[in-house]
């Protein structure tokens, strides 16, 4: 419908009712539907313990400290079993030994670690915390690796378990460095074939007897390779 204007136009005003209604309709059309809340179960401290848990038991023998071995059992809970979100997470830990001299601190340590496991989140920090504990009487060598304390060796066991269940990813050695390390190992093994069996090499974790301590992995596996000190265990090299 047209309207005839007989007088002079002195001002004007735009009606936005139609524009606002069209904008609201377009926004409603482009609005994405709200995704439903995920039913993925995460680890938390109120999670009830199942009647059955899967786990692993590790034997820890420290002849320099005690003649009795420790048996570390770590039980895991499987979250979201049978789905794409399936996870295996540590739930509790137990340490048993015939040596009762360490009974009190073993019970305290296992209860604290179990509480941390059930708390959820990133529990991998426990490994470094345990490794940083040093015995004031001095550490010891075990299978070619220097252990500053029993607690630090328990930390190594925890790390081994977390690697097995996929919570810790082991850094892969560069292929070029891996080839050099393998070549050096082959050369060293070839040099010792004519010599009688050396039990000290076996106690050193299979590394050469004259190897030195690696500051990165604490294994007695650092040798001079092509004029540079290189670890035959982790591949750490002073030459980069």
Image (cartoon, grey):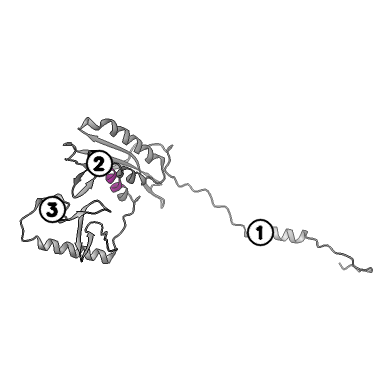
| Residue 118 found in image quarter | top left
Nearest to viewer (mark 1 / mark 2): 2
Local SS, label 1: helix
* Residue depicted at x 43% and y 45%: 42
Residue span colored magenta = 153-161
| Residue 158 found in image quarter | top left
Mark 3 is surrounded, within 10 Å at the Cα level, by few (under 14), some (14 to 19) or many (20 or more) other residues, namely some
Identify the main secondary structure in magenta: helix
Which residue is identified by label 3?
201
Local SS, label 3: helix
Instruction: Report whether 148 appears left or right of 206.
Output: right
What's the distance in space between the residues labelled 1 and 2, CA to CA? 64 Å
Q: Quick check: marks 1 and 2 in contact, CB under 8 Å?
A: no
What's the distance in space between the residues labelled 3 and 1, CA to CA? 74 Å
Q: Locate residue 74, reporting x and y percent.
A: 30, 41
Q: Looking at this view, is 71 or 180 the one in front?
A: 180
Instruction: Report whether 117 appears left or right of 103.
Output: right
Mark 1 is surrounded, within 10 Å at the Cα level, by few (under 14), some (14 to 19) or many (20 or more) other residues, namely few
Q: Quadrant of the N terminus?
A: bottom right
Mark carried by residue 27: 1
What's the distance in space between the residues labelled 3 and 2, CA to CA? 23 Å
Which residue is identified by label 2?
149
Q: Quadrant of the C terminus?
A: bottom left
């Amino acid at each position: 419908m047209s309207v005839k204007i007989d007088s002079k136009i002195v001002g004007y005003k735009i009606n936005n009712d139609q524009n606002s209604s069209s904008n609201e309709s377009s926004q409603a059309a482009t609005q994405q539907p709200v995704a439903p809340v995920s039913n993925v179960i995460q680890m938390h401290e109120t999670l009830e313990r199942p009647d059955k848990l899967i786990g692993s038991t590790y034997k820890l023998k420290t002849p320099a400290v005690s003649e009795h071995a420790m048996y570390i059992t770590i039980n895991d809970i499987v979250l979201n079993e049978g789905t794409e979100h399936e996870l295996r997470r540590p739930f509790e830990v137990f340490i048993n030994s015939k040596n009762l001299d360490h009974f009190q601190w073993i019970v305290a340590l296992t209860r604290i670690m179990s509480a941390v496991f059930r708390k959820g989140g990133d529990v991998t920090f426990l490994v470094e915390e345990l490794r940083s504990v040093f015995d004031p009487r001095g550490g010891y060598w075990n299978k070619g690796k220097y252990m500053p304390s029993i607690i630090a060796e328990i930390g190594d066991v925890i790390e081994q378990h977390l690697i097995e269940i996929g919570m810790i990813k082991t850094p892969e050695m560069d292929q070029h460095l891996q080839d050099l390390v393998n070549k050096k190992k082959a050369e060293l093994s070839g040099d010792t074939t004519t010599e009688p069996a050396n039990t000290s090499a076996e106690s050193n974790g299979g590394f050469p007897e004259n190897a030195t301590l690696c500051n990165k992995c604490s294994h007695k596996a650092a040798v001079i390779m092509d004029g540079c000190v290189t670890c035959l265990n982790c591949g750490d090299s002073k030459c980069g």
